[in-house]
Image (spheres, rainbow, N blue to C red):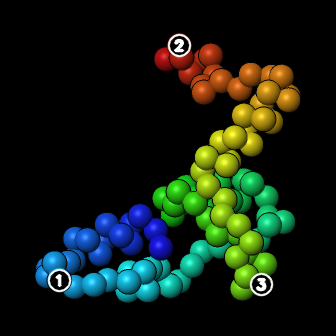
């Protein structure tokens, strides 16, 4: 169940006495990734679908959740280990 599922369900509620369950509002067509997939692929999926997290699966079993924050932490680790600074834009772009 995503925050988008919850927001959609809340917007659709007309009667406050209705009892909704997670099954009533959860996404059923899941987009997932396997643990051996590359981080760039995971980042593309997250960005393309505007997800905050992505289920990591082996077969049909969820083995974890990869979040945007997880990717950001890993990117920071890689940048610090490489010791080279990556700028948001090229110096030539700033001149225009």
Q: Is 57 or 96 nearer to us in this picture?
A: 57
Q: Earlier in the sequence, mark 3 or mark 2?
A: 3
Q: Position of residue 27 (x, y in %)?
A: 47, 79
**Quarter location, residue 62:** bottom right
Q: Which image quarter: residue 4?
A: bottom left
Name the N-terminal-most of marks 1 and 2. Answer: 1
* Residue underneath mark 3: 59
Q: Determine which quarter of the picture holds residue 63.
A: bottom right
Position of residue 55 relative to residue 76, above or below, is below
Pointer 2 local density, CA inside 10 Å: few below 14, some 14–19, many at least 20: few
Horizontal relation, residue 27 to residue 91: left or right? left
For residue 33, say whether it is visible. Answer: no
Q: Nearer the viewer, residue 29 or 3?
A: 3
Residue at image coords 61%, 65%: 54
Up the image or down, 80 lies above or below 53; here it is above
Residue at 73%, 82% in the rendered image: 61
Residue at the (54%, 17%) spot, across then down: 94
What is the C-alpha distance between the residues marked 3 and 1?
Answer: 39 Å
Extreme residue in the left direction: 15
The residue mark sitting in front, 1 or 2, is: 1
Q: Which numbered disc, 3 or 2, marks the residue closer to the eye? A: 3
> Dot 3, how many residues are within 10 Å of its Cα: few (below 14), some (14-19), or many (20+)?
few
Q: Which mark is residue 17?
A: 1
Q: From the viewer's perspective, is the residue at label 3 or at label 1 nearer?
A: 1
Residue behind mark 2: 95
Is 25 above or below relative to 80? below
Disc number placed over residue 90 in the picture, else none? none
Secondary element at tag 3: loop
Helix or strand or loop: what does disc 2 sit on?
A: helix
């Amino acid at each position: 169940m995503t925050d988008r599922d919850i927001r959609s369900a809340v917007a659709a509620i007309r009667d406050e006495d209705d009892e909704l369950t997670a099954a009533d509002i959860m996404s059923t067509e899941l987009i997932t990734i396997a643990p051996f997939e590359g981080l760039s692929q995971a980042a593309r999926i997250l960005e393309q679908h505007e997800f905050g997290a992505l289920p990591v699966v082996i077969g049909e079993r969820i083995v974890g959740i990869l979040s945007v924050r997880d990717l950001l932490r890993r990117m920071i680790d890689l940048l610090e280990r490489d010791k080279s600074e990556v700028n948001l834009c090229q110096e030539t772009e700033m001149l225009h």
